Image (spheres, helix red, strand yellow):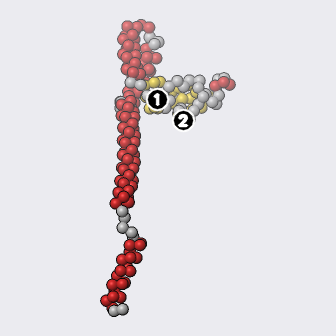
């Protein structure tokens, strides 16, 4: 064989090997292959879409919840400052109760005090009941311990120095109490 024939035989052999290793796909195989690629891409986009929709729904829910909480506690600072005014009203009321000679004045002042209390209650402010309840360090702030007058009052709140308040079921001021020992 001549050198040229040898080269052409090698070239033919190489093309035959290539054809055996990588056969030329038929039109049907090409269409099926493209269809599979399209289906997998569609599934991928569908998954991304579903995840995006779920994330957006979670965002809307979380945003609505935060907005409601913000509206409920928007006046928390102002109400917190008004608690001291409310304490002064309670002290003034106790002082006025012992003076029957100033009944018309007392009646007018009590109307103002009650209006303030009802306005704050309409905004979600609630007074905590503490007297004769078990002492709870998470809720109560103990000022002092004194010997309890009865055996049932040991470990319970005997007196309330400063009232505690919640605003929409969230603690805004802990009650300061005296505990029996």
Q: Which residue is drawn at 38% across and 32% down?
A: 68
Query: Total number of numbered labels?
Result: 2
Is residue 110 positioned above or below 73 on the image?
above
Question: Which mark is drawn over residue 169?
Answer: 1
Q: Which of 176 and 28 is in front in this view?
A: 28
Residue ranking furthest to the right: 151
Q: Where is residue 114 in the image (x, y as percent from the top left)?
A: 40, 16
Left or right side of 153 for 129? left
Q: Position of residue 7 (x, y in %)?
A: 34, 86
Q: Which residue is drawn at 35% across and 57% down?
A: 31
Going from the N terminus, do you reach mark 1 or mark 2 first? 2
Residue underneath mark 2: 138
Residue 76 seen in render = no
Left or right side of 158 for 93? left
Q: Which residue is drawn at 46% across and 31% down?
A: 170
Say which quadrant the N terminus sits in: bottom left
Residue 119 seen in render = yes
Residue ranking furthest to the bottom: 2
Is residue 54 positioned above or below 77 on the image?
below
Q: Measure the C-alpha gap from mark 1 to mark 2.
A: 15 Å
Density class for disc 2 (Cα within 10 Å; few <14, some 14-19, many ≥20) is: few
Q: Is mark 2 on a helix, strand or loop?
A: loop
Q: Nearer the viewer, residue 33 or 173?
A: 33
Q: Where is residue 56 in the image (x, y as percent from the top left)?
A: 36, 41
Q: What element carries label 1?
A: loop
Q: In which quarter of the image is residue 14?
A: bottom left
Q: Quadrant of residue 178?
A: top right
Density class for disc 1 (Cα within 10 Å; few <14, some 14-19, many ≥20) is: few
Residue ranking furthest to the front: 1
Cβ–Cβ below 8 Å for labels 1 and 2? no
Q: Position of residue 64 (x, y in %)?
A: 37, 34
């Amino acid at each position: 064989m001549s050198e040229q024939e040898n080269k052409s035989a090698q070239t033919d052999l190489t093309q035959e090997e290539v054809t055996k290793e990588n056969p030329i796909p038929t039109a049907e195989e090409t269409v099926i292959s493209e269809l599979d690629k399209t289906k997998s891409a569609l599934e991928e986009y569908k998954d991304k879409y579903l995840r995006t929709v779920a994330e957006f729904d979670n965002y809307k829910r979380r945003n609505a919840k935060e907005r409601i909480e913000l509206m409920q506690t928007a006046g928390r600072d102002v109400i917190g400052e008004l608690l001291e005014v409310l304490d002064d009203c309670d002290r003034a009321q106790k002082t006025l109760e012992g003076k029957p000679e100033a009944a018309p004045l007392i009646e007018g002042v009590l109307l103002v005090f009650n209006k303030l209390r009802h306005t704050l209650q309409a905004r979600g402010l609630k007074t905590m009941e503490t007297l004769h309840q078990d002492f709870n360090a998470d809720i109560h702030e103990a000022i002092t311990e004194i010997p309890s007058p009865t055996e049932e009052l040991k470990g319970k709140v005997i007196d309330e120095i400063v009232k505690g308040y919640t605003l929409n079921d969230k603690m805004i001021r802990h009650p300061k109490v005296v505990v029996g020992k």
